[in-house]
């Protein structure tokens, strides 16, 4: 092979490039590095090729234009004229780039002269994250590399969870970052269907990174001026979508749907019994609330936390599709009153966790108006459907609710966590929760203190959950969310139709899915022709857990299962992952059959 003559102007540049490349293992990283080192390179110099480090250097030499050479000559001459001090500093920086084994967290900013090391460390972290993101969207990659808890506790290939009294070097921390992702679950993988919150939105991810960098608290405008105003804008937008345009609605972002539901019950009780705040439960009658038997378990948790008691949560019967039966609600309310109990709240569900059912909100609202009860709608899962003009009718009546829980981290795909509690009456959250701490909420501040929202919450420290949602809304627009959500509904319909035609699958509900939840059983060949009986159901009960166990061990796909009432274990498919395609749905069906055929 002909030996290339190396121009003198490139000697310094090539050594610098080599220094950067020594810790770079992938082509994409090389391209990023070249773009960083040589911003003057023509656009034609950036092509999609896969090659090793040495070939990349050779390719770079061959692709450099005359203009690039002139620019690099100037840079080289300037470098040669630099002082000894500059050369030493440059060499030190290059050494840091290649070896973090002798560097520690105490060497990073705000340490003196820690800027180069900080850049190096964070760039290495970003490379780890980019590699993980790339793998996440690759359907050929495993969703997880499963290990049992005791294996993680004992340590895996140098991944030690035990904490030391002495600092570890930055290089080890990078290894730990890589291993943490390696042994975790890729929830953005196209074949991850395990939870209602799935997928990985890159804009939302960028928002979360910025949020962590800002590292502020949401309790006052004083320390979170942009974020508190963003929260106000988002809450107003969400309230308008619900249909509360003629009122001064209010709300707050909270750490998940369970806490939002707790807020809903908290303000419902305060509205009827404001004396509870100062005097406690002792001054109240025996209050009770109502929720469907398919309602989320967080309602009982909230009742336990608030001192109401789980025995005072009355579960209302549902129809065969999991919807609350209004006549049963009316009957339960009257029965409670006859027993001397005092009803104060009804929790309706818009998108139940297992079946994806929507309670008849107008009928429930009518009953609440008759009995003067607070109506809270748990739309943590189904709230996003309000953004679809095609499907929003399923939440008709939500505008009559007094409070609503809505989790953008579910159907809208915002990174965890992002949940809002919305109320139709402005000022109620503040009156219920404020304690007017003088060191935070001074009345004589220089700005409009209405934006000091921290006293509306039961928290003091509150994470910024709004920016990632705001940024995604800017990126997609309301119509972008609509397209995304409508596609989930189409995928659910496709999945339902495919299963309907297969004789070794049986749907829990014969009718088309109302939401993206599709529930079904898989029958191995040995059970397929056995008549329905207690004995058969006992065997069927074991099938879903065994298939799920194999899925986890092999890391091919993740899908949830559960029993419900008299129904033995069945699979619950949900669509909330923007990376999922029809081919992934087909793969899931084939994988269930492959793993289950011999059970």
Image (cartoon, rainbow, N blue to C red):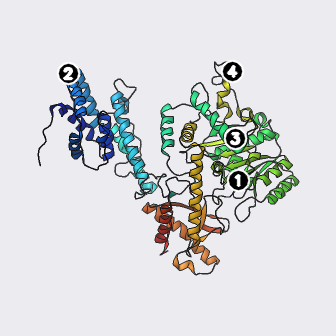
Is residue 520 something that shows in the picture? Answer: yes
| Element type where label 4 sits in the image | loop
Q: Give the vertical position of 412 relative to 167 (above or below).
A: below
Residue 570: percent from left, percent from top: 59, 66
Q: How far apart, in angstroms, are the residues tagged by discs 3 and 1?
A: 15 Å
The residue at which mark 2 appears reads as: 81
Q: Is residue 241 left or right of residue 325?
A: left
Q: Which of pointers 1 and 4 lies earlier in the amino acid sequence? A: 1
Residue 156: percent from left, percent from top: 37, 52
State the residue in front, 585 or 544: 585
Q: Are marks 2 and 4 in contact (CB under 8 Å)?
A: no
Q: Give the vertical position of 437 relative to 42 (above or below).
A: above
Instruction: Single out the mark in the foreground, 3 or 4.
Output: 3
The image's mark for residue 240 is 3
> For the view shown, which residue lies furthest in the right direction?
338
The residue at which mark 4 appears reads as: 443
Residue occupying image coordinates x 48% and y 69%: 590
Instruction: Single out the mark in the foreground, 1 or 4.
Output: 1
Q: Are marks 1 and 4 in contact (CB under 8 Å)?
A: no
Q: Is residue 291 left or right of residue 582?
A: right
Q: How many marks?
A: 4
The residue at which mark 1 appears reads as: 393
């Amino acid at each position: 092979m002909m030996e290339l003559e190396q121009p003198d102007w490139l000697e310094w540049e090539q050594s610098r490039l080599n220094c950067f490349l020594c810790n770079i293992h992938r082509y994409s990283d090389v391209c990023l590095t070249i773009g960083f080192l040589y911003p003057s390179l023509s656009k034609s110099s950036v092509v999609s090729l896969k090659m090793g480090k040495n070939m990349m250097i050779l390719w770079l030499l061959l692709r450099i234009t005359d203009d690039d050479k002139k620019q690099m000559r100037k840079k080289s001459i300037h470098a040669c004229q630099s002082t000894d001090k500059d050369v030493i500093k440059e060499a030190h920086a290059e050494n840091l780039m290649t070896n973090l084994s002798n560097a520690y967290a105490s060497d990073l900013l705000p340490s003196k002269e820690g800027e180069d090391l900080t850049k190096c460390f964070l760039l290495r972290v970003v490379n780890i994250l980019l590699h993980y993101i790339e793998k996440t969207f690759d359907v050929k990659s495993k969703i997880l590399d499963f290990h049992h808890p005791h294996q993680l506790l004992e340590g895996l290939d140098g991944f030690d969870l035990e904490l030391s009294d002495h600092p570890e070097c930055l290089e080890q921390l990078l290894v730990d970052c890589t291993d943490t992702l390696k042994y975790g679950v890729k929830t953005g993988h196209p074949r991850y269907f395990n939870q209602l919150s799935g997928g990985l939105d890159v804009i939302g991810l960028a928002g979360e990174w910025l949020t962590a960098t800002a590292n502020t608290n949401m309790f006052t405008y004083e320390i979170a001026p942009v974020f508190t105003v963003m929260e106000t804008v988002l809450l107003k937008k969400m309230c308008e979508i619900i249909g509360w345009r003629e009122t001064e609605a209010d709300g707050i972002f909270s750490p998940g749907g369970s806490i939002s539901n707790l807020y809903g019950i908290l303000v419902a009780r305060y509205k009827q019994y404001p004396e509870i705040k100062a005097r406690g439960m002792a001054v109240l009658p025996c209050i009770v609330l109502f929720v469907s038997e398919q309602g989320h378990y967080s309602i009982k948790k909230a009742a336990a936390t608030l001192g109401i008691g789980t025995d005072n949560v009355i579960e209302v019967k549902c129809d065969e599709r999991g919807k609350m039966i209004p006549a049963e609600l009316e009957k339960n309310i009257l029965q409670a009153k006859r027993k001397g109990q005092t009803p104060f709240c009804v929790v309706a569900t818009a998108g139940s966790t297992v079946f994806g059912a929507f309670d008849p909100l107008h009928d429930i609202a009518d009953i609440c108006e008759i009995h003067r009860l607070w109506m809270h709608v748990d739309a943590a899962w189904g709230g996003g459907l309000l953004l679809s003009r095609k499907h929003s009718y399923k939440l008709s009546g939500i505008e009559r609710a007094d409070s609503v829980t809505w989790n953008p981290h579910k159907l809208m795909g915002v990174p965890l966590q992002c949940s809002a509690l919305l109320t139709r009456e402005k000022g109620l959250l503040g009156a219920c929760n404020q304690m007017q701490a003088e060191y935070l909420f001074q009345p004589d501040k220089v700005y409009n203190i209405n934006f000091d929202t921290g006293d509306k919450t039961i928290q003091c420290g509150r994470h910024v959950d709004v920016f990632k949602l705001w940024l995604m809304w800017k990126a997609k627009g309301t119509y972008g969310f609509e397209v995304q959500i409508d596609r989930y509904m189409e995928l659910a319909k496709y999945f339902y139709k495919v299963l309907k035609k297969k004789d070794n699958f049986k749907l829990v509900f014969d009718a088309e899915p109302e939401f993206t939840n599709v529930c079904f059983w898989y029958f191995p060949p040995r059970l397929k022709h056995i008549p329905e009986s207690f004995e058969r159901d006992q065997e069927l009960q074991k099938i879903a857990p065994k298939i799920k166990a194999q899925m986890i061990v092999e890391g091919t796909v993740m899908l949830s299962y559960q029993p419900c009432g008299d129904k033995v274990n069945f699979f619950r498919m949900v669509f909330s992952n923007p990376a999922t395609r029809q081919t992934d749905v087909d793969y899931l069906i084939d994988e269930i059959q492959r793993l289950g055929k011999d059970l």
